Amino acid sequence: MYRSRVIPCLLFKNSGLYKTVRFKNPRYLGDPINTLKLFNDKEADELVILDISASANGAGPNLEYIKRFTRECFMPICYGGGISSIKQVETLFRLGVEKVALNTSLYLNPNIVIEATKQFGSQSVVASIDVKKGLFGSYSVCVASGSKDIKFDPIQYAKRAEELGVGEILLTSINHDGMMDGYDLDLIQRVSSAVNVPVIASGGAGNLSDCVKAVNAGASAAAAGSLFVYYGPLRGVLINYPSQYELVEAFN
């Protein structure tokens, strides 16, 4: 029976996993390898791992840790963070990463996107688009872990990414990140209806029904962080993921 993908999105920094709220105040969660093993056991659909310090610090991907990630992980991995050259993309695929998510480099050096899609196929290149909503309701794209507003409308930016050849868009609401108050459904609807490539909604899931709402708004898949690493109103750290039965029931 059909159901949409539900994807844990993990934030990596230095040698640990963290969770942010609106891209700020990263809270340490624990060891990434143990967390990967738990998601293996729970049969997660796939995994997004984003290095939230690499681009901001001008560093490249942490290849030593990525090797460990791919060795331990039985599900497809999408990695993003600090990718600034086609050579790094080649290395990541050689290490076993299935997809690369390009954020800052999508803005600064779109030729990487063009070359990566030519060499490895559109299905392996993801445009990571982080969006901030202003006081008066206007949307704007940010890069460098949300620290730089590039004054682009997300709909036009998503269309541009599609024209460059990306096969998927990871669309994250900065305002909803870590809030567990639901996705920005209006943003999802606008972007997904403007492009022909799949959109992964991210930012704001507080329960599985939020993921269903994101898909109903037009997303092809739902990514979440807090939902899968926290438990209870006090947000105790507990790695969790719905069973296959729960997923099928929710989406049907």
Image (cartoon, rainbow, N blue to C red):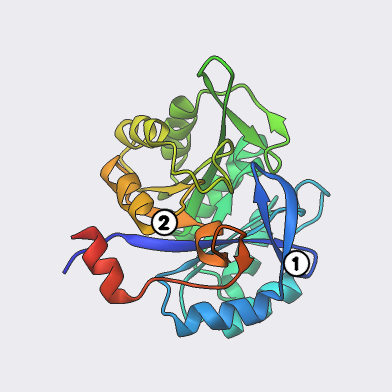
**Few, some or many C-alpha atoms within 10 Å of disc 2 (few <14, some 14-19, many ≥20)?**
some
Question: Image height check: is 153 above or below 178?
Answer: above
- Placement of the N terminus among the 4 image quadrants: bottom left
Q: Position of residue 185 (x, y in %)?
A: 38, 36
Q: Earlier in the sequence, mark 2 or mark 1?
A: 1
Q: Nearer the viewer, mark 2 or mark 1?
A: 2
Please name the amino acid that badge 1 sits on: Asn
Residue 207 numbered mark, or none: 2
Secondary structure beneath label 2: loop
Estimate how packed mark 1 is, as few (under 14), some (14 to 19) or many (20 or more) residues with alpha carbons within 10 Å: some
Residue found at x 61% / y 61%: 235
Which residue lies at the image location 60% right of the left edge and 47% below the top edge?
112
- For residue 72, which quarter of the picture? bottom right
Residue 100 percent location from the top left of the image: 55, 58
Furthest residue to the front? 233
The residue at the point 63 percent across, 33 percent down is 142
**In this image, 28 relative to 242: left or right?**
right
User: Is the residue 146 above or below the residue 54 in the image?
Assistant: above
| Rendered image: mark on residue 18 | none
In front of the other: 163 or 173: 173
Q: Nearer the viewer, residue 28 or 145?
A: 28
Q: In the figure, is residue 76 to the left or right of 5?
A: right
Q: Position of residue 238 (x, y in %)?
A: 58, 72
Q: Position of residue 178 (x, y in %)?
A: 59, 49
The residue wearing badge 1 is 62
| Local secondary structure at mark 1 | loop
Q: Is residue 161 left or right of residue 142?
A: left
Image: 35 above or below 228: below
Task: Name the foreground residue: 92 vs 152.
Answer: 152
